[in-house]
Image (cartoon, rainbow, N blue to C red):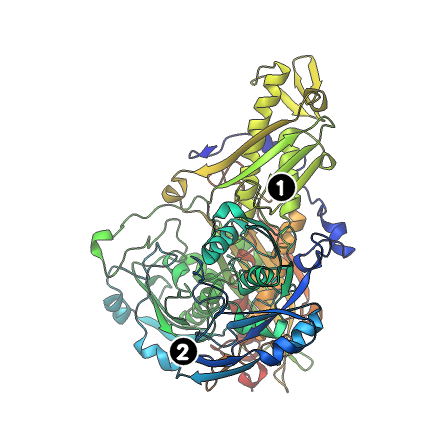
Amino acid sequence: MKFDTPATTNPVDALKIIGQPVDRIDGPLKVTGTAPYACDRHDVVDNQAHGYVVGAAIAKGRITAMDLAAAKAAPGVLAIVTAENAGTLAKGRRNTAALLGGPAIQHYHQAIALVVAETFEQARDAAHRLQVAYAPAKGAFDLEAAKASAPIAKPIYGQDPAATAVGEFDVAFARAPVQLDATYRTADESHSMMEPHGTIAAWDGDQLTVWTSNQMVGWAVDDLARTLGMPREKVHVMSPFIGGGFGGKLFLRADVVLAALGARAAKRPVKVSLPRALMPNNTTHRSATIQRIRIGATSDGTITAIGHECWSGDLAGGKPEAAAMQTRALYAGEHRMTEHRLAVLDLAEANAMRAPGEAPGLAALEIAMDEMAEKLGMDPIAFRVHNDTQVVPDNGQSSTDDAKADTSHPPFSKRPLVECLQDGAKRFGWDKRAMKPGSARDGRWLVGMGVAAAFRDNLLTKSAARVRLDRRGVITVETDMTDIGTGSYTIIGQTAAEVMGVGLDQVVVRLADSRFPVSCGSGGQWGGNNATSGVYAACMKLREAVLKQAGFDGREATFAEGAVHSGDRRVTLASLADGRDLVAEDGIEYGDLDKRYRQSTFGAHFVEVGVDAATGETRVRRMLAVCACGRILNPKTARSQVIGAMTMGVGAALMESLVVDRRAGYFANHDLASYEIPVHADIPHQEVVFLDETDPMSSPMKAKGVAELGICGVAAAVANAIYNATGVRVRDYPITLDKLL
Ligand code: MOS
């Protein structure tokens, strides 16, 4: 199904099941501990052996010698895989560093061996008996030091220029009567999902089957086949339950490749789970950023110049953290510039983490807006409202390539940012915020309120599904879409039930098997809207098959209560599939609607904090998010996405920081004991409000993404609340108590 004109009324609009806060259909499996996560699959193949990953003990250099003898002689050892005996490995299209290193080492804890043994304990024991000699080389690990020589990055996500310019920023900024020029810093962060990366791999001849934990089944098949140099058709990937991803499982990782190689070497199925302590340095992380923001305004608060420069680091050939991207489109202003510079650092690979770009970008920009409002003597909400724009002020003009300049200013399909801010202000009691920082007190607590805008795009990606009607009247949906804890099973089930006119208990959803039609997968908050749209397309095709079987005229017929109705005729779906199942396969594909109308999601975050006047300890006391993100397919799962994201935003604001050991070149706090993330006791009452927004530009579902919008701006709202409470402006995340004293 091609979607290239705005959606009109369709079966989803009945909203009998879509839009209802139904419980997760996979909930009972989750809460009883019976959902089969990758490494729980003891049942899928017999004779599983265990692999233990060995990570490099240097950040850069070469392995000069590996002595495997002692490890090989250890009890239970079946095989040891290293770059020397693994055969030729290519690199996945989406990987920056090799997933099996050696002799060259590209980053600390890059996998250099897999030890396979009968038991996990034997594999771990033998792994510690490997003798590895290294010749370390000098690496670059310090973003501050590398900043000065960092070049402008390659186009962002391969398509958007890394630097843009509109008008004459320097001139306009210099002339502006009110100016802000401030630099902000965000930390290296680790996804820290509950379930570590893990895989069981089994060979049957030249056919490889893996049970793994991956957000993007199609990408995993593609990159695994590439890495091993085998045809895609011979690779079967399943990832039906995932204990969190946050972007850390978007890409093929070492556990998958090593499990496959280990299984080949041991001639047995092999299970590999990455030890927690290997994750921050072995897998991807969100790069730290340094961001300089300049805003110039007239004394009435009109922004005339806005500039945002961002520095981040990655391995050679890697990607920048796109933290200035949202500044191209969030606020008005005639003269503008953005720039992303990328330093080559020899730390682990930097890559996407929940709201890549916007999360750290808004963490900086939305403090800058608060600072600027204060300089202007304006309320921070009034300042944002005053500079709202209903068109995109910078649609990606390259400052280095005028030939490609795009001077259009497309409108947003919907942009109720002002409503989000104003509605939130009313609900939160913003009028009770003390104007003077450091002036509100509750016992020993200094109390303050902060606000920030939330903004993230809604991405349209094709997505396919297969649906089957059987003689029981049951609709079975099959798509390689994943559920990373987001609720995909449930909203896909709701979609099929709504379109086919059956109860949710008459729908079976089967996900994340590479033998099913290729979906959009889970990432970039694109999963909910696109995956359900693909299911919608397949169901609409199944409706045609049903009507044909019933001999009905499509224009007259309605689907309800497990039957199709036309005039006074009623035929049950079950009876139409009595002879054979009716099957339909289709997907959603998009035209250029998202080029003509910028599709984005908006919100406003409100935070109240208390800061202990003596110790500087910050406690978040209240949080509110008001979100406008298209039709809400399931208010319960959508709310869960937003409160989870708000919690992650508190982590970024107050706790999360991978500490770089600048001599050895690794993240020193590489476990959950020392990399701090919020726990329940850190998080207060959270309220989430969804504005009533149905966006016909987004898809037949009229929905958008929400999972990443929820984190966008949260850190700045916390930082602004701390400033309001204490009068101390911290521009360096995380805002630990030492920075407040
Ligand atoms: Mo998201 S960081 O694209 O999984």
Q: Secondary structure at mark 1?
A: helix
Tell me the number on the disc at residue 492. Answer: 1
Lateral position of residue 286 relative to residue 595, left or right? right
In the displayed image of the protein, which residue is found farthest to the left? 403
Residues at circles 2 and 1 in contact by the CB criterion of under 8 Å:
no
Q: Does the image show residue 524? A: no
Tell me the number on the disc at residue 215. Answer: none
Lateral position of residue 683 relative to residue 692, left or right? right
Q: Crowdedness of circle 2 by 10 Å Cα count: few (<14), some, many (20+)?
A: many
Classify residue 137 by image quadrant: bottom left
The image shows residue 441, relative to residue 48, as above or below, that is below
Read off the residue under disc 2: 143
For the residue marked with disc 1, what is the amino acid? Answer: Ile
Q: Looking at the image, which is closer to me, 396 or 608?
A: 396
Q: Looking at the image, which is closer to me, 98 or 269?
A: 269
For the residue marked with disc 2, what is the amino acid? Answer: Leu
Q: Residue at x 71, y 58 (%)?
A: 47
Q: Give percent across and percent down for residue 273.
A: 63, 65
Lateral position of residue 517 relative to residue 590, left or right? right
Q: Give percent across and percent down for residue 470.
A: 69, 28
Lateral position of residue 464 relative to residue 368, left or right? right
Q: Quadrant of the C terminus?
A: bottom right
Q: Crowdedness of circle 1 by 10 Å Cα count: few (<14), some, many (20+)?
A: many
Q: Secondary structure at mark 2?
A: helix
